[in-house]
Image (cartoon, rainbow, N blue to C red):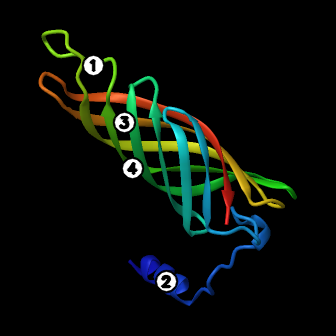
Amino acid sequence: MRFALVLAAAIGFAPPAHADPDDSIRGADKGTLGVGIILGEPTGITAKLYLKDDQAVQAAIGSAFIGGGLQLHADYVFHPFILQTRDSFVLPVYAGPGVRLIDYTSGRSDASGASTSAFALGLRGVAGLLFDFKAVPLDAFIEVAGVLEYEFRTGAGAALRLNAGAGVRYYF
């Protein structure tokens, strides 16, 4: 009990930690909003908005070639640690929860064999690796996400899906 009180007092009186700007994920001249392209599942447009140096909201909209339709997803990602820091780039890992909406338009058929479209909503868990350049306002990324979705179509229901993609973003 005494140890816990001493530890709490020590933490309360400790000065706040300040990160070295060279160890930050984003370069000093980089904006907080990045827009670019993503290739994979989906293939389309991606954006990332940094809320803090180690937290961001990222999203993408594009064609889901494997699923056959239009996909939109958004994730709240954390950058818990940096694998490598060099003069020209930073290599952080990111992970976080998200949501996915998809409108399946091809490869689906009803009981009579007629082609149908279906809407699905899912929870997403994403993890990725970010190659963030310090000298230019660009980053490149590779990510994988598991999706637990519910398809709103007769006879469909819940299913597990996989998304994977890579892309680049320019920051403003």
Residue type at mark 3 is Val
Q: Earlier in the sequence, mark 4 or mark 1?
A: 4
Front: mark 2 or 4: 4
**What is the spatial separation of the Cα atoms under label 1 and label 2, in whole angstroms?**
63 Å
Circle 2 residue: 6
Label 2's element? helix
Front: mark 1 or 2: 1
Residue type at mark 1 is Arg
**What is the spatial separation of the Cα atoms under label 2 and label 3, in whole angstroms?**
45 Å
Q: Is residue 85 above or below residue 163?
A: below
Q: Is residue 109 above or below residue 40?
A: above
Residue type at mark 4 is Gly
Q: Residues within 10 Å of mark 1 (few under 14, many from 20)?
A: some
Are the residues flagged by discs 4 and 3 in contact, CB closer than 8 Å? no
Circle 1 residue: 108
Can you name the residue that lies furthest to the front here?
A: 114
Front: mark 3 or 1: 1
Q: Position of residue 82 (x, y in %)?
A: 68, 54
Circle 3 residue: 147
Q: Earlier in the sequence, mark 3 or mark 1?
A: 1
Q: Quadrant of residue 133?
A: bottom right
Front: mark 4 or 1: 1
Are the residues flagged by discs 2 and 4 in contact, CB closer than 8 Å? no
Q: Residues within 10 Å of mark 4 (few under 14, many from 20)?
A: many
Horizontal relation, residue 119 to residue 8: left or right: left
Q: Earlier in the sequence, mark 1 or mark 2?
A: 2
**What is the spatial separation of the Cα atoms under label 3 and label 1, in whole angstroms?**
19 Å
Q: Earlier in the sequence, mark 2 or mark 4?
A: 2
Label 4's element? strand
Q: Residue at x 68, y 79 (%)?
A: 18
Q: Position of residue 151 (x, y in %)?
A: 22, 32
Residue type at mark 2 is Val
